[in-house]
């Protein structure tokens, strides 16, 4: 589903992170933390997205040590179309039923909570 958009799933995740960010841009370090990947992997992801014209890099306006990745209009359009295509195939979860997906999601949520990946609100 992502091939026609020239995206791998990791590139799609990085693009969507920018798509849903408040300003459409994030520091590369913050992207790595949110995607839970090594800084080298973020650099590689942004290199690929930049080469496709989906993202541009820029210097942070107040921190010379920080580089920002910003989604382009082409990137926004591609993110929308890619998401539609993934939704059409239920993100590859077929042949599972909606109930099966819910059960798996609940189990993985419990595993991640127990591992300390996130804290539940009180």
Image: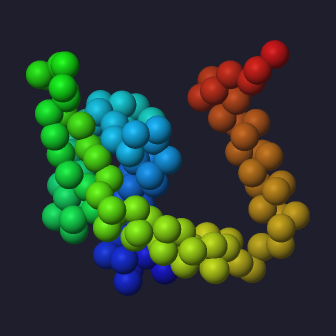
**In this picture, residue 76 sits left or right of residue 53:** right
Q: Quadrant of residue 5?
A: bottom left
**Residue lying at 40% horizontally and 62% vertically, measured from the top left:** 76
- The foreground one among 43 and 116 is 43
**Residue lying at 46% horizontally and 38% vertically, measured from the top left:** 22
Q: Percent from the top left, x then y, of residue 113?
A: 70, 29
**Quadrant housing the C terminus:** top right
Q: Percent from the top left, x then y, of residue 38?
A: 30, 37
**In this picture, residue 101 sits left or right of residue 19:** right
- The foreground one among 27 and 48 is 27
Q: Percent from the top left, x then y, of residue 53?
A: 21, 65
**Residue lying at 24% horizontally and 37% vertically, measured from the top left:** 68
**In this picture, residue 18 sits left or right of residue 85:** left
Which residue occupies the extreme top position in the image? Answer: 122
Q: Quadrant of residue 116?
A: top right
Q: Is residue 14 above or below residue 86?
A: above
Q: Is residue 63 above or below residue 1?
A: above
Q: Percent from the top left, x then y, of residue 46?
A: 24, 51
**In this picture, residue 6 sits left or right of residue 40:** right
Q: Is residue 59 above or below residue 101?
A: above
Q: Is residue 92 visible?
A: no
**Residue lying at 60% horizontally and 29% vertically, measured from the top left:** 117
């Amino acid at each position: 589903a992502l091939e026609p958009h020239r995206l791998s799933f990791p590139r799609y995740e990085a693009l969507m992170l920018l798509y849903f960010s408040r300003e459409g841009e994030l520091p590369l370090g913050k992207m790595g933390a949110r995607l839970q990947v090594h800084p080298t992997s973020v650099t590689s992801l942004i290199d690929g997205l930049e080469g496709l014209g989906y993202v541009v890099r820029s210097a942070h306006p107040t921190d010379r040590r920080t580089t920002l990745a910003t989604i382009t209009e082409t990137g926004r359009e591609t993110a929308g179309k890619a998401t539609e295509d993934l939704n059409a195939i239920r993100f590859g979860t077929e042949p599972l039923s909606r109930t099966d997906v819910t059960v798996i999601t609940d189990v993985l949520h419990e595993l991640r909570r127990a591992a300390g990946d996130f804290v539940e609100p009180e």
